[in-house]
Amino acid sequence: MTSDVGLASGGPVVPSRGALRPVDPRRVQITGGFWAQRQAVNGTATIEHCRTWLDRLGWTGNFATTGAGTARRRGREFSDSEVYKHVEAMCWESVRPGGTDYAARLDELTAMIAGAQAADGYLHTAFGRPGQPARYSDLNFGHELYCAGHLIQAGVAAARTGRAAGLLEVARGAADHVCDTFTDAGLCGHPEIETALVELFRVTGEQRYLDQAARFVARRGHRSLPEHEFGWRYFQDAVPVRDGEVFAGHAVRALYLAAGAVDVAVETGDDALLAGVARQFDRTLARRTYVTGGMGSRHLDESFGDDFVLPPDRAYSETCAGVATVMLAHRLLLATGDLRYGDIADRVLHNVVATAVADDGQAFFYANTLHQRTVTEAVPADREQLRFGGGPRAPWFEVSCCLNNVARLLASLGTYLVTEDDGGMQLHHYAPMTVEAAGMRLRVDTGYPDDGGVVVTVEEAPDAPRTLTLRVPGWARDVAAPPVPKVYRPGDQVRLDLPVKPRWTFPDPRIDATRGCAAVEAGPVVMCAESIDQEDGVTLDDIQVDTSVAPQATAVKGRLVQPVERDWPYTGLVDGRESSNPIVVTLVPYHRWARRGPSAMRIWLPIATP
């Protein structure tokens, strides 16, 4: 078996121990289907789109104005992180099988970033220069350590891909400065540095990076950050990480911290910490997660709501939270070997990540509502949007963390699909692809998620027994695919048939906002009704569906109920509607909504009453 993977190898997460091992993304080539086109668009259009906006708005230029101070700096205090995520995405894309090599652009940005670094390793363009606030003068919202974390992750990507020469040294300089400055005290209001320092330890073997990450995790929850109207939960500083029962506060902050805590737990052998994060994630999935896998139901502070507070029309479900959920689930999967973590990653990938980005890769949702009551409005293609909590896909937002986050995930997507251990290979997500792992080479053919058939063909295998494990999603209740160790020969096949026909889904009755409603799912894909597809005169809020009839691929049986217009919206009548007419309610995959012009949309549909 041949491969071009040399000393510079590995993906975004490479633990030194755990039940399963990640597979280098260069060993997984997605060859078609649902994700191949999205990877291709991401590797060209999306990354170039991000470059254009970063340059146009001056966010990259901030690194070239090292002596100018406040007068010439552009963007929010965290804009440096977008440049770093852009660099990371280009690193992974440059080595992706069939990808675009951004070597020249990476060298250009690396030189610019290195030129902005202070002699002591500090690097942030919004603090410490003439006319700017002092370094670390706003730990709540300054995002200095958050940005350093993304710089370090870009440096890790550079080291593992052999691109962006010199960036690892810049990242180490920043990490050394962080360790020197925060040895005894201090936190960042936005977690991110924790997981970055652990990964840098994994690359360099430098113990101080792991020790500092462990300190940051241990310091959380003691209310050491300044008090704020959003409360300490928002900053993940209300409860020690290992003592929490459920994720709370700012959703992305919570998920990034959890990922960092898993990394620390794995490398230090802290099984209690690992169990604590897993416990909180389980409860969050059971009580604070949308049917799409989206997380965060509060717009004001981008936070989790209380248990079962999941209003579809006020879903925040930030795209970054979706990316963070995949990253956390992947870490827990590697650490524990529990295949069920693939279920939530599968759900989020198909219903948050795939939904967020436009077909051309040049516009995106920041938040992902489950119920758009009013028709979306087109936004200008040449102006950044200030309102990022909902609305249509936009080319850029004042806060544009999501698109670069999706870009780095999609560029390295192959490593999330497959794992290996000493006994064989595990397939967690299905796409047409070729894979080299566990001493084997496989070809996977499938039409997933539209078709549930999966055929795995062995192209190369050793003479020793190997076990092939195929994840069976939780929604495929009647399917069994027990892994069987055997000596595989070229041409051997393993088949899996998953039932992806549409099915009714009903919410937990404790979710007040969706009580009396139903949704339709097909495999991992959540369906929705979009106004553009309905009959003339049909308003989505006046639809009811008949759940006694099985849903079809693109439609369900329903009725249109005419409301009674009153001068007061409350009445002594149980229904308050005067007539109804039978209709067919057309459905589309949620990830396809708002791609054919302005529209309204809803996932949860009221159930018709007798």
Image (cartoon, rainbow, N blue to C red):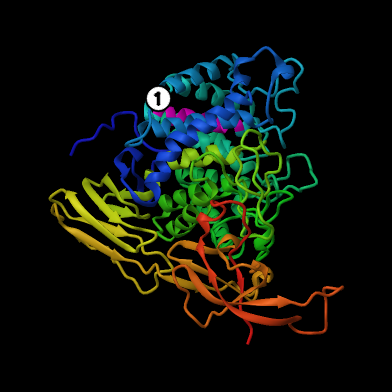
| Residue drawn at point x = 63 percent, y = 48 percent | 392
In the image, is 233 to the left or to the right of 534?
right
Is residue 151 highlighted in magenta?
yes
Q: Label 1 amino acid?
A: Arg
Q: Which residues are magenta?
A: 147-159
In the image, is 229 to the left or to the right of 117?
right
- Mark 1 highlights which residue? 163
| Residue drawn at point x = 68 percent, y = 52 percent | 303
Can residue 129 be seen here? The reply is no
Expressed as whole percent of the image width and height from the top left, the position of residue 146 reads 61, 34
Of the pair 346 and 312, the residue shown nearer to us? 312
Picture layout, residue 570 above or below residue 122: below
> Which SS type dominates the magenta stretch?
helix
Picture layout, residue 549 above or below residue 248: below
Residue at the far right in the pictured view: 567
Expressed as whole percent of the image width and height from the top left, the position of residue 589 reads 49, 60
Of the pair 260 and 63, the residue shown nearer to us? 63
Residue at the far bottom in the pictured view: 610
- Name the image quarter holding the C terminus: bottom right
Expressed as whole percent of the image width and height from the top left, the position of residue 316 reads 65, 53
Can residue 128 be seen here? The reply is yes
Is residue 333 highlighted in magenta?
no
Expressed as whole percent of the image width and height from the top left, the position of residue 276 reads 55, 55
| Residue drawn at point x = 56 percent, y = 38 percent | 194
Residue at the far front in the pictured view: 536
Q: Quadrant of residue 214?
A: top right
In what element is the residue under mark 1?
A: loop
- Name the image quarter holding the N terminus: top left
Residue at the far top in the pictured view: 67
Of the pair 289 and 269, the residue shown nearer to us? 289
